[in-house]
Image (spheres, grey):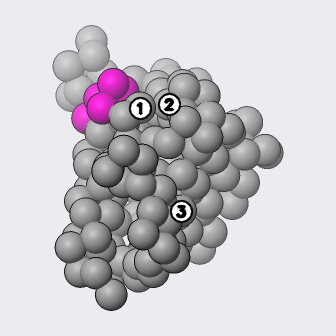
Amino acid sequence: MDLNTVEEIKRLRARYCRAMDQKDWLTLATLYSPDTVLDLRGETVLAGASEPVRGADAVVAYIRESLGEGICVHISFAPDITLIGPHEARGVWGLEYKVWQPAGSAIPPLHGYAYSYDDYVRIDGAWKVRAVRLKVLWSESVALVIAPETQGLA
């Protein structure tokens, strides 16, 4: 196993989570392959997750809309990465995600635990996320919301 490649993929996942949490949509878009697929059908709280989202631009737009003005934290852990070939890999990650929404938001706050089954592809020497499929173990729409003044949203 090429440990340098595994480390590159771990760093990609770290940037992916950080870009979502910091709402850095431009960076997030650069981390996906053009044909990426986001399959959140396992997360029943999210509206519109009845079908996979296809294409990097559509995936970023979906995530942006789903998070709204909320504050989010995605913690990935225990990676199990398999190299399929010199330009393809698969990974399974433990995941905890939490999204707090401002008071009055139409978007529900979320908290859940899942396994993320990811596919990666190397394009022009850089690893990209090609697919993300969640298998949710537990999820809830969190009843607690954060007051807007706490988030600087007031």
In-image side of 9 versus 143 (left or right): left
Q: Which residue is mark 1?
A: 29
Q: Quadrant of the C terminus?
A: top left
Q: Amino acid at mark 1?
A: Ala
Q: Quadrant of the N terminus?
A: bottom left
Residue 20 position, x and y percent, is 35, 40
In-image side of 39 versus 94 (left or right): right
Q: Which mark is residue 119?
A: 3
Q: Amino acid at mark 3?
A: Asp
* Residue at screen point 56% across, 56% down: 132
Q: Amino acid at mark 2?
A: Val
Q: Are marks 2 and 1 in contact (CB under 8 Å)?
A: yes
* Residue at screen point 23% across, 26% down: 151
Could you tell me if residue 87 is visible in this image? yes
* Residue at screen point 33% across, 25% down: 26
Residue 68 position, x and y percent, is 46, 25
In the image, residue 35 above or below residue 107: below
Which of the two discs, 3 and 2, sits closer to the camera?
A: 3
Q: Nearer the viewer, residue 74 or 57?
A: 57
